[in-house]
Image (cartoon, rainbow, N blue to C red):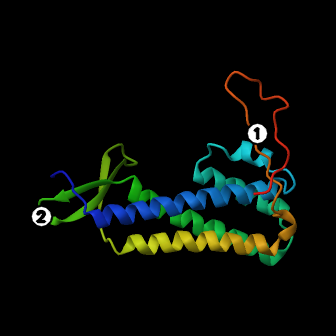
């Protein structure tokens, strides 16, 4: 195995996936804020801060079951969760693989992963890198962001704008009583 040098275009496509996924994470968190309390989203911000995307999806799934009473919207919510889990798996495959060139085809980068098998041995799996999949993955992520907006529009009473509070304090101050008044977002 030789050191991998991806092209600038390949790095750029991977970067675009990273940025789109970051936007999806924030969109998912803000969706949760509205499901928890549309009038004061600070509690939601506290609960979602630092959570993994998988945890955000679990939280959104649970909250949707208790907060969305429209059957069609709840169905769209569940389908959105399923698609978000799928796209997160694909994103993780790209970002958490090892990138190598095999000696049998040094022109094609390969994503390789290893994991412990059920019998305790290590299993390796290789997937040839198809750069064309990256824009498609980014497009699917962007479609999920749009899909979440569509769900929010179908339950407008849970997603009113202008109700986000932000808490600000310095390291040497107590957080008690430091919440700002609601601000327009």
Q: Residues within 10 Å of mark 2 (few under 14, many from 20)?
A: few
Helix, strand or loop under label 2 = loop
Q: Quadrant of residue 61?
A: bottom right
Image point 60% across, 70% down: which residue? 144
Q: Which residue is mark 1?
A: 167
The image shows residue 39 at horizontal and vertical percentages of 87, 54
Marks 2 and 1, how far apart in space?
56 Å
Residue ranking furthest to the top: 172
Res. 128 visible in picture: no
The numbered dot on residue 84 is none
- Indicate the position of residue 77 as horizontal and vertical percent values: 72, 69
- Residue designated by label 2: 104
Element marked by disc 1:
loop
Viewer-proximal residue among 73 and 13: 13
Task: Please indicate whether residue 58 sits to the left or right of residue 63 in the image.
Answer: left
Relative to 34, 53 lies left or right? left
Q: Going 79% across and 62% down the picture, which residue do you hit? A: 65
């Amino acid at each position: 195995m030789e050191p991998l040098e991806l092209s600038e275009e390949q790095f750029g496509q991977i970067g675009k996936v990273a940025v789109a996924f970051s936007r999806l994470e924030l969109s998912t968190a803000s969706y949760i804020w509205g499901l928890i309390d549309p009038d004061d989203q600070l509690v939601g911000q506290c609960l979602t801060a630092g959570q993994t995307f998988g945890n955000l999806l679990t939280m959104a799934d649970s909250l949707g079951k208790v907060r969305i009473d429209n059957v069609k919207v709840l169905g769209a919510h569940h389908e959105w969760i399923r698609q978000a889990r799928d796209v997160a798996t694909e994103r993780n495959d790209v970002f958490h693989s090892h990138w190598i060139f095999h000696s049998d085809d040094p022109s094609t980068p390969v994503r390789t992963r290893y994991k412990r098998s059920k019998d305790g041995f290590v299993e390796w799996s290789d997937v040839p890198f198809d750069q064309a999949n990256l824009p498609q993955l980014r497009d699917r992520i962007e479609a999920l962001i749009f899909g979440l907006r569509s769900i929010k529009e179908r339950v407008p009473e849970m997603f009113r704008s202008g109700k986000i509070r932000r808490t600000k304090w310095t390291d040497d101050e107590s957080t008690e009583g430091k919440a700002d008044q609601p601000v327009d977002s």
